[in-house]
Amino acid sequence: MENQSNQGRIIIFDTTLRDGEQCPGATLNVDEKLSIARQLARLGVDVIEAGFAYASPGDFEAVQKIAKTVGTEDGPVICSLARAIKADIEAAAEALKPAAKGRIHTFISTSDIHLEYQLRKSRAEVLAIAEEMVAYAKSFMDDVEFSPMDAARSDPEFLYQVLERTIAAGAKTVNIPDTVGYMTPSEFGDLIRGIKENVPNIDQAIISVHGHNDLGLAVANFLEAVKNGARQLECTINGIGERAGNASLEELVMALHVRRQYYNPFLGRSEDSEEPLTNIDTRQIYKTSRLVSNLTGMLVQPNKAIVGANAFAHESGIHQDGVLKNKLTYEIMDAQSIGLTDNQIVLGKHSGRHAFSARLKELGFELTDSELNKAFLKFKELADKKKEITDWDLEAIANDETQQA
Ligand code: KIV
Ligand code: ZN
């Protein structure tokens, strides 16, 4: 069902506010979640998983507020996670009521290890619960997603059965999680192909993938899944999330963008098609990354692909010489394509208020006039002592001002 999959584009499902927030120290308050959700909408994600409505009153409120303010008719689908339990599904449905387009994402584990030690249930019991709870979620809204948790370590025959029954019960998206980040790319691709070939009604649902980065392979696994039929990718900004994190949105999107000619045929397009593979406005990537980093306090490592401080920096003389002659010598993508200014302005004591304010905006800060005045004075004081002011310095100054206000 290509028509359901976003005019043939790959659906970007952002779970920064749910799975992303599930990492130590990354707790966000409701207002912070709202400003991230607004920025995710500007970025162009198709689905925002806004939280786990049943988990806490704060999560419920965040899902509800995001549903109301960001979940407009032309905005993204707003989703809440729910265990395959009636009370969870009811909370999700209630919180999502204000959204023009809401989705309940319900899940239950299917691997034997989870069944034995965590759920203490038999396969037959899990199958019945999954089917019944998808149907229950469907009684509240049409858009229901089902995840067999730890799918990657589940017996494939049992997984096929669960997927067939949950699709028959009304799941429009079936999400295949590599919950513990165990898969390698070719294995994950085979898993998706096996699902396509062995679940008889799979054409009635979109295949989604969800993966953690325990072996640093989440993005590579997803790209292999796309080649084998996955059409929704669940990811987070800066790859934040449980343990080693989730697949990173910016890496996935830019891989699909930069290498679109390679991926086009897997989406049934001609190799030279220039049609974008996702709905993401890539020029919003850097700003979104900075906002999430600032609000969660999760620093981005300098050598992080796409959004790290060094991702577009050239240090060696040979590289600098090449880039000055022709950028293509050492750059596979344009800094502007992710929203950076082409030439990084190095801020120092001679810089003016305008350059200072523009850089803060690029870093995701919206300061009032009076905050900006005070921040600019601090910047000038620092610039007298330091030759070059880094983004870390600027963020410290801006955070200082916004927190005092
Ligand atoms: O990692 C996981 O399996 C999850 C599910 C709830 C989709 O986050
Ligand atoms: Zn997860």
Image: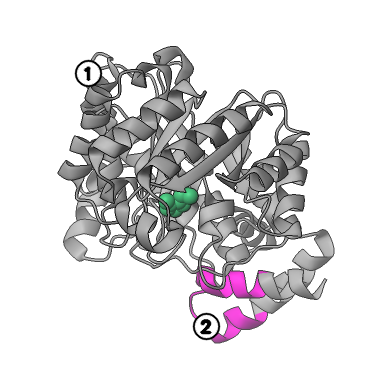
Disc ID at residue 386: 2
Q: Amino acid at mark 2?
A: Lys
On the image, the x and y values in percent for residue 244 come to 37, 65
Front-lying residue, 113 or 268: 113
Q: Amino acid at mark 1?
A: Glu
159, above or below 311, in the image: above
The response on whether ligand 2 sits within 8 Å of label 2 is no
Query: Residue at position x 70%, y 55% from top?
Result: 59
- Quadrant of image for the C terminus: bottom right
Disc ID at residue 372: none
7, above or below 309, in the image: above
What separation in Å lies between label 1 and label 2 (alpha carbons)? 50 Å
Residue 387 falls within the magenta-colored stretch? yes
Query: Residue at position x 33%, y 45% from top?
Result: 151
Disc ID at residue 271: 1
On the image, the x and y values in percent for residue 370 come to 84, 65
On the image, the x and y values in percent for residue 294 come to 59, 65
The response on whether ligand 1 sits within 8 Å of label 1 is no
Dot 1: what SS?
loop
The part of the chain drawn in magenta is 381-398
